[in-house]
Amino acid sequence: MRITGKTQLAGIMGWPVAHSRSPALHNFWLQEHRIEGVYVPLPVRPEQLAPALRALPVLGFRGCNLTLPHKQAALSIVDRVDPLARRIGAMNTVIVAADGSLEGSNTDVYGFRENLRDSVPDWHPAAGPAVVLGAGGAARAIVAALIDDGVAEIRLVNRTRARAERVAAEVAAPPSRTSIHPWNARDAALQDAGLLVNTTSLGMAGEPELDIDLARLPTTAVVVDIVYVPLETALLAAARRRGHRTVDGLGMLLHQGRPGFEAWFGTPVRVTRDLRAAVLTTLAVPR
Ligand code: ATR
């Protein structure tokens, strides 16, 4: 890699940030398209987020991504927030405008939708109710994506009911109907569903397994896990054995990076097998 005074800069702010796969993703695209640019991890303490963001234009950065714990705090720092990020209550992408002002957006909605389209092109929002397990930041983006796609019924299943209620109140929108189900009713919530999405951390390496009985889920339903370490979670393995089409979490991560990259570096990018393979090599899977 050649670094010169003209090298274009972008990065990711997080605390910690070392675990992020975004540098592998964006640097793959930079090399693939022979763009003179670099994407760097930026460890930024929560109390330093505002000066760090304001430094982006000063240092010549095109923008950055944000990961934990900055996704919410940044909303009140940047100059403009797109309506979708405002509705979800979190942003993960910052673009430095020509005048040095900062624009915030949330590309997780796009990432989820594009990954689903890419992985299961014939899935249709009318396939049946969508069951979403979890009510964190990822669930909020996914619920927004499902509503915007026109899914008529969304069943939110979460351990802490109050969090699911907040998602329903802040993100859900008619004509989609949203219902809330207790965690111990998760098996029953699968009845007649067309889509199941795990947005919880259950099944992730180092976390407990997701304990769910898929017996009531029609085999035509698509099963999505946003966990990507390991790539094939116990949920996806069980779903595959029952004949469901499954979608792993890596694709969402890769697709959510596209809008930021295209805005910063002005080049359209795709999610290819080579990209997946390159990012996969950075995922050590502890068993
Ligand atoms: P993110 O923002 O990445 O989605 P999060 O806000 O930490 O992450 O959300 C994690 C989700 O996993 C939550 O829905 C959480 O349930 P609670 O709202 O009840 O905390 C869910 N989760 C984590 N551990 C769980 C467990 N042992 N059983 C059930 N749900 C769990």
Image (cartoon, rainbow, N blue to C red):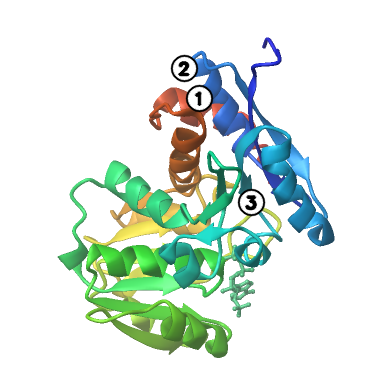
Residue 208 sits in quarter: bottom right
Q: Is residue 127 left or right of residue 18?
A: left
Q: CA distance from mark 1 to mark 3?
A: 19 Å
Mark number for residue 66? 3
Disc with the residue nearer the chain's start (3 vs 2): 2
Q: Residues within 10 Å of mark 1 (few under 14, many from 20)?
A: many
Mark number for residue 29? 1
Residue under the image location 18 percent in, 49 percent down: 122
- Between residues 95 and 159, which one lies in front from this camera angle? 95
Count of number-bearing discs: 3
Residue wearing tag 2: 33
Labelled pair 1, 3 in contact (Cβ < 8 Å): no
Disc with the residue nearer the chain's start (1 vs 3): 1
Helix, strand or loop status at disc 2: loop
Labelled pair 2, 1 in contact (Cβ < 8 Å): yes
Is any atom of residue 188 visible in this view?
Answer: yes
Is any atom of residue 195 visible in this view?
Answer: no
Q: CA distance from mark 3 to mark 2?
A: 24 Å
Percent x, y of residue 155: 36, 79
Helix, strand or loop status at disc 3: strand
Percent x, y of residue 92: 57, 53
